[in-house]
Image (cartoon, helix red, strand yellow):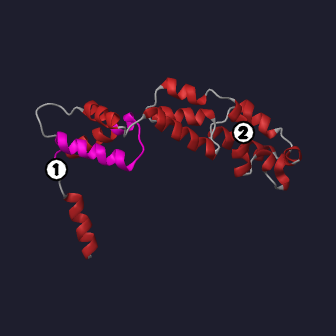
Amino acid sequence: MTETQVVHHHLKDKQRKPLDEDSLRQLALYYVGRYATSSKKLSEYLKRKINQSGWIGTAPPDIYAIISYCINLGYINDPLFAEMKYNAFKRRGYGKIRVKSALKAAGIDEKIIDSLTENNDSAMETALHYAKKRHLGPFYEKEDRDDIKIKRRHFAAMARAGHSADVIARIFKINIEDLES
């Protein structure tokens, strides 16, 4: 066994110290200082840390008080987090379905999600951006463009990116020459 293997072996065996209220609050502050997060993600992180390390104390940990503390300090802002994530997904060309799913998984309230995704004008724009970036549909430049297998593969890729079937169909009907002029 080499020296580095011995060090790594001892790190795995090392027992973590059980957490108390102060150490849990410090973990929360470190986490929100390092990552943009939602209240649900912070809650899951703290629960995971408690499960890994254990808990010292007679009363159960008050995770929601710690989350409220972080919200009051301005470190957690779910609507702002949702808007940031929405814009990042939009820049990448992801569709409404994929964006809604990701925001819901992050614990964002349904009303906030609906207010961000209600604008249908950007659906064609983001789908067009995605198709152009990934060379799908009318932007596929090889000679086998009209092959049904290729079209199905491109359609499936756009569907996985969260675009609706009607938007994908409209993108596939676009003539590139019309766009360039």
Q: Residue at x 33, y 41 (%)?
A: 45
Decide if residue 1 is in sight here: no
Q: How many numbered badges does the structure rendering display?
A: 2
Front residue of 10 and 56: 56
Q: Secondary structure at mark 1?
A: loop
User: Which residue is outermost to the left?
Assistant: 58
**Considering only vertical position in the picture, is 44 above or below 92?**
above
Q: Position of residue 68 (x, y in %)?
A: 30, 31
Front residue of 144 and 131: 131
The answer to whether residue 33 is magenta is: yes
Q: Residue at x 53, y 28 (%)?
A: 113
Q: Position of residue 159 (x, y in %)?
A: 66, 38
Q: Which mark is residue 125?
A: 2
Tell me which amino acid carries mark 2: Glu
Mark 1 highlights which residue?
Answer: 17
The answer to whether residue 30 is magenta is: yes
Q: Residue at x 19, y 58 (%)?
A: 14
Q: Secondary structure at mark 2?
A: helix
Tell me which amino acid carries mark 1: Lys
Q: Residue at x 29, y 43 (%)?
A: 28
Which segment did they paint magenta?
16-43
Question: In the shown orientation, is residue 39 left or right of residue 22?
Answer: right
Distance of mark 1 from mark 2, alpha carbons?
Answer: 51 Å
Front label number (1 vs 2): 2
User: Which residue is outermost to the front?
Assistant: 73
Front residue of 6 and 120: 120
Q: Position of residue 100 (x, y in %)?
A: 55, 32
